[in-house]
Image (spheres, helix red, strand yellow):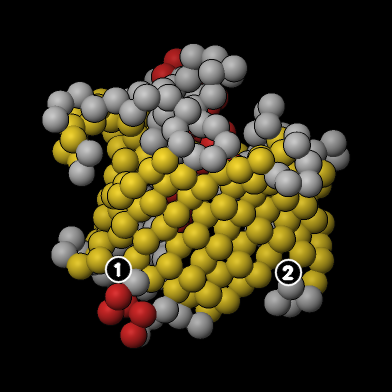
Amino acid sequence: MRYYFLIPLFLLFKFSNAQNDMAFKTGEWFKYKLSYSGWFKAGEATVNLNEDVNNNQLLHAKMIGKSTGAVNLFFKVYDRYESYFHKKNIKPYRFIRNINEGGYTKNIEILFDQKNKVAKVNNFKKKSSNDFSFKENSQDMVSIFYYLRNFFRIDDLDKNNEIAIDMFFDSENYSIKIKYLSTEIINTNFGKILCHKIQPYVQSGRVFKKDESLTMWISADKNRIPMRIKADLIVGSIRIDLDSFSNLNHPFEIKFN
């Protein structure tokens, strides 16, 4: 089972009021736990955000996913995703994908030329470098996590309660669609949290059972934290829950204890 569980973490929703009221700040940190088929822990992921040490106009986000416990005996995973993006508009500058999933490896760097809309993809494993065009306002696989938390509002939904965002990944342009389902209270380790329930559309067949296999719950406070993700796979299911956090930009709202 490859760790596609990281992908939903980069498709997170935001209904913000203003660009100067950011949903996040430097130093923010999350830890998630992953369980397979609802009964045993299979992995964990961390997400942290800091200012780039070499350029104070950029933020540096890093996401690490790894297998844990008994899973390591038959399918060891260690995935690292990083994005350097501009503070003001959250447009990507540099993206890194370095993964090892049960022996399947990939090591890619993408450099975004925002002026000419050209992405230089350096594939270190294949020792190749190629240029590709990307669409205006495209995000990478990590920056989209922060972009959607900040800039989308409920007013941006179309008549089908959906939004779309462009993303450039590896060497291709994608249009990601996300559907708003409802707002509800869920039980978590921290208490009862009011959340927006959303459904990112995924491609069925290889990993997911159907296009609507993902369901996500995003905190309805100003932080817009991904609290829970559920996915139906071809074989079994996965569940991702927020386990701990630190250095939020806004108070974490617990509706009931």
Judge left or right: residue 38 versus residue 13: left
In the picture shown, does residue 216 fall above or below 164? below
Is residue 191 something one can see in this rendering?
Answer: yes
Quadrant of the rendered image containing residue 134: top right
Q: Amino acid at mark 2?
A: Asn
Q: Residues within 10 Å of mark 1 (few under 14, many from 20)?
A: many
> In what element is the residue under mark 2?
strand
Q: Amino acid at mark 1?
A: Ala
Judge left or right: residue 107 versus residue 192: right
- The spot of residue 213 in percent (x, y) is 31, 51
Position of the N terminus by quadrant:
bottom left
In the picture shown, does residue 256 fall above or below 234? above
Q: Residue at x 72, y 50 (%)?
A: 94
- The spot of residue 247 in percent (x, y) is 46, 36
Q: In the rendered picture of this protein, how many numbered marks are placed on residues?
A: 2
Q: Residue at x 55, y 63 (%)?
A: 80
Q: Residue at x 34, y 66 (%)?
A: 43
Residue furthest out toward the bottom:
73
- The spot of residue 183 in percent (x, y) is 25, 25
Cα–Cα span, label 1 and label 2 = 29 Å
Position of the C terminus by quadrant:
top left
Q: Residue at x 68, y 65 (%)?
A: 108
Residue on which the image places disc 1 = 42
Residue closest to the eye, 173 or 10 = 10
> In what element is the residue under mark 1?
strand
- The spot of residue 242 in percent (x, y) is 32, 47
Per the rendering, the mark at residue 123 is 2
Q: Nearer the viewer, mark 1 or mark 2?
A: 1
